Image (spheres, rainbow, N blue to C red):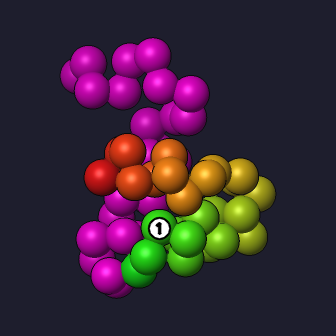
Amino acid sequence: MGYFKGKQFKKDIILVAVGYYCRFSLSYRDVSEILKERGVSVHPTTIMRWV
């Protein structure tokens, strides 16, 4: 699967972030805060690009 090739973050992080956004109808900022609580710093704009 070439979707994740060359990405800064691991595939698992991207899938979790997109999953939170889609499943729970959270904002990009909310998803960013959840990931930050788990030790992964991702800017909300980055999450927007993934979705």
Task: Decide if residue 38 is in sight here.
Answer: no
Classify 25 as above or below 51. Answer: below
**Residue 32, percent across and down?**
59, 64
Q: Residues within 10 Å of mark 1 (few under 14, many from 20)?
A: many
Q: Secondary structure at mark 1?
A: helix
On the rendered structure, is 31 left or right of 27?
right
The structure residue drawn at horizontal position 36% and vertical position 70%, both measured from the top left corner, is 21
**Would you identify the image quadrant in which residue 16 lies?**
bottom left
- Under mark 1, the amino acid is Tyr
Q: Position of residue 7 (x, y in %)?
A: 47, 25
Q: Is residue 8 left or right of residue 49?
A: right
Q: Is residue 1 visible?
A: yes
Q: Is residue 47 left or right of residue 38?
A: left
Q: Nearer the viewer, residue 20 or 30?
A: 30
Please determine whether, in this image, residue 41 is positioned above or below residue 37: above
Q: Residue furthest left?
A: 1
Residue picked out by circle 1: 28
Residue drawn at point x = 27 percent, y = 26 percent: 3
Where residue 23 sits, quadrant-wise, is: bottom left
Look at the picture and state if 46 lies above or below 21: above
Q: Can you give x and y, in whole percent of width and height, for residue 33 in the image? A: 65, 71
Q: Is residue 21 magenta?
A: yes
Q: Residue at x 36, y 27 (%)?
A: 4
In the picture, residue 50 is in which quadrant?
Answer: top left
In the rendered image, which quarter contains the N terminus?
Answer: top left
Specify the segment rendered in magenta. 1-25
| Residue 48 coordinates in the image, percent (x, y) | 40, 54
Instruction: Give the number of marks.
Output: 1
The furthest residue to the front: 45
Residue for point 54% across, 58% down: 44
